[in-house]
Image (cartoon, rainbow, N blue to C red):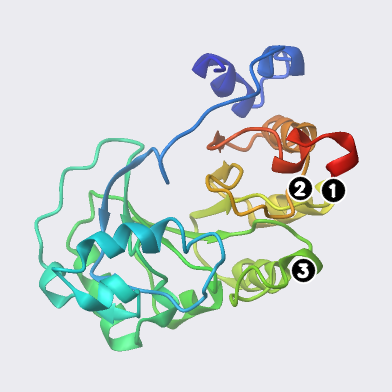
Amino acid sequence: MIEESIFENNNRGDTSVNKAQLFPKGSGMAKKTNMYSKSKKQWNPFVGCEHDCLYCQSSFQAQLKRRRKNCEKCYIFIPHTHPERLNASLPKIRYGQFMFTVSSGDIAFCDEDYFEKIIARIRQEPKKTFLIQSKNPRTFNRVKFPDNVILGTTLETNRDDLYEGISKAPKPSQRYRDFLEVQHPVKMVTIEPVIDFDENIMIDWIQNLDPCMIWLGYDSRKNHLPEPPLEKVKSLYWELGQRGFTVVLKTIRKAWWEKLNRSEQP
């Protein structure tokens, strides 16, 4: 486990911190958190997704299956609304925390009228911060967001060729271009589950998007995705931190194939 103070120094762009300090020998850079550690609570007035991401089937959908008695649509994960949750009492949010909105789905599958109702509810809570994330960031152009909303998207890789068969969502390069066109002051990027990438392109993407925060980590399940080696992820973390970006590490480990015998590696 790496000391939190080391993370903080690096992500303020402190060049006095070197890689040996960031990744001490034997640490494995291991730091595992929940989906978003700064998420105070998940608020789901809309649930469901049709991107059919390979790695979601064993995580979010599996969790929702436990709620079958309460909602059959949640169980089968088809996009649907929960109007009764629109006016639910929401917890207080401390500085640096946010409410992960539609965490169990993708807002891209929500119709515009109900989407506007969600935003209207958010406008009633100007002192709280809300995160809305989509793997189809073009959907953000449908409504006008207040300033207490963070807009996020997932960019697991820059390589569209590695994304075939993993998800029906727009390819990463299309997501990047669409998110770049979204006019909103506060953005966030998730590089998780990380898939092999070209470091220089990923850095360029992040610099152009200028997110307030980046989440970086490997697949937390055993989906055997085309993962980059651990050293490559370490380097990306370092390079982004040196450019002044706040990077929060999630599941960090060796790529699944690095644990195989050399003769068995792909």
- On screen, residue 141 versus residue 81, left or right, reads right
Asked if 64 appears above or below 228 in the picture, the reply is below
**Which x, y percent locates residue 126?**
23, 55
Q: Are marks 1 and 2 in contact (CB under 8 Å)?
A: yes
| Secondary structure found at label 3 | helix
- On screen, residue 37 versus residue 32, left or right, reads left
- On screen, residue 87 versus residue 112, left or right, reads left
Asked if 116 appears above or below 85 in the picture, the reply is below
Mark 2 — residue? 203
What kind of residue is marked 1? Asn
- On screen, residue 20 versus residue 183, left or right, reads right
What residue sits 33% from the left and 76% below the top?
A: 76
**Which x, y percent locates residue 175?**
64, 70
Chain-order first, disc 3 or disc 2: 3
Q: Quadrant of residue 150?
A: bottom left
What residue sits 77% from the left and 37% below the top?
A: 260
| Secondary structure found at label 2 | helix
**Which x, y percent locates residue 19?**
75, 18
Q: Quadrant of residue 84?
A: bottom left
**Which x, y percent locates residue 27?**
64, 16
Mark 1 — residue? 200
Per the model, the C-alpha gap separating discs 1 and 2 is 5 Å
| Secondary structure found at label 1 | helix
Other residues around mark 2 within 10 Å, as few (<14) / some (14–19) / many (≥20): some
Per the model, the C-alpha gap separating discs 3 and 2 is 16 Å
What kind of residue is marked 3? Asp
Q: Which mark is residue 160?
A: 3
Asked if 194 appears above or below 172 in the picture, the reply is above
